[in-house]
Amino acid sequence: MSFEQLGLSPYIAKSISKLGFLKPFEIQEQTIPHILKGKDVMGIAKTGSGKTLCFVAPLLQKMQHASYEKSRAIKALILVPTRELAVQIEETFVGLQDALRREVKTQAVYGGTSINPQMKNLYGTEILIATPGRLLDLLDHNAFSMDQLEYLVIDEADKMFQLGFGEEMERILKVVPAKKQSILFSATLNEKVDEIKATLKINPIVVEVKKQDI
Ligand code: ADP
Ligand code: MG
């Protein structure tokens, strides 16, 4: 199986191969085709199994064809539990953009650093990667809007609860528009993670990969 066989464009596939990825990992094989088709997906696989690419590659492929007017309305929100993860995901989004038709403006925001530069840079941002606390602060400042949100990704959903972000998540998910594609990833599946489906009122395709590729 190749990345192109999953429905990814030759351009994105080429950028992926430049990262040194020869073939898709199992979770990528099983989720990328659904995500490309616009389905709600919940993917469960161990840490290190390659979950980041599962949403980064399809989102870039879909978003590069859209011509959004420059505004404060983000199109994709990636919710993550930690600053480190936010930065790492931003790097993956940027790293895969070489061969795209246009730049898809991506920004990571997180706490522990001044909010002002993050606020200024939000104009024109299409993909926002955010930790829950900083996201809520930025929303309180009306720094961006979610009215035109098309994609919601929650990465490391289990860790969100382990770190005590359950309440923040709930506040965020309440104000996310109903009409969007929802994508959830987690290393483990538990009651809390499962509850997100009810909060979002979705019935996603659930993909659970038990074996490890590496
Ligand atoms: P997870 O989010 O499941 O913990 P990551 O997305 O962080 O996993 O990926 C784990 C590691 O595997 C990263 O170093 C990543 O660059 C690498 N990786 C991801 N997909 C592939 C692939 N198809 N082939 C080789 N390496 C990959
Ligand atoms: Mg991950």
Image: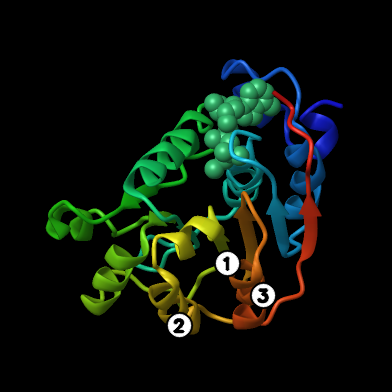
What is the secondary structure assignment of the residue under circle 1?
loop
Q: Residue under circle 2?
A: 175
Camera-side residue of 62 and 130: 130
Local secondary structure at mark 2: helix
Does the residue tagged 1 have its C-beta within 8 Å of any atom of ligand 2?
A: no
- Which disc, if any, is residue 197? 3
Q: Nearer the viewer, residue 18 or 203?
A: 203
Q: Compared with residue 16, is residue 70 higher up or lower down, i.e. above or below?
A: below
Q: Residue 153 in the image: state x and y as whole percent.
A: 56, 59
Q: Nearer the viewer, residue 75 or 23?
A: 23
Point 64% across, 54% down: residue: 188
CA distance for labels 2 and 3: 15 Å
| SS at circle 3 | helix
- How many numbered badges does the structure rendering display? 3
Mark 2 sits near ligand 2, with its Cβ under 8 Å away: no
CA separation in Å, label 1 and label 3: 17 Å
Mark 2: few, some, or many residues within 10 Å (few <14, many ≥20)? few
Q: Quadrant of residue 20?
A: top right
Residue 81, horizontal then vertical, whole percent: 41, 55
Q: Is residue 111 left or right of residue 33?
A: left
Residue ID for mark 1: 150
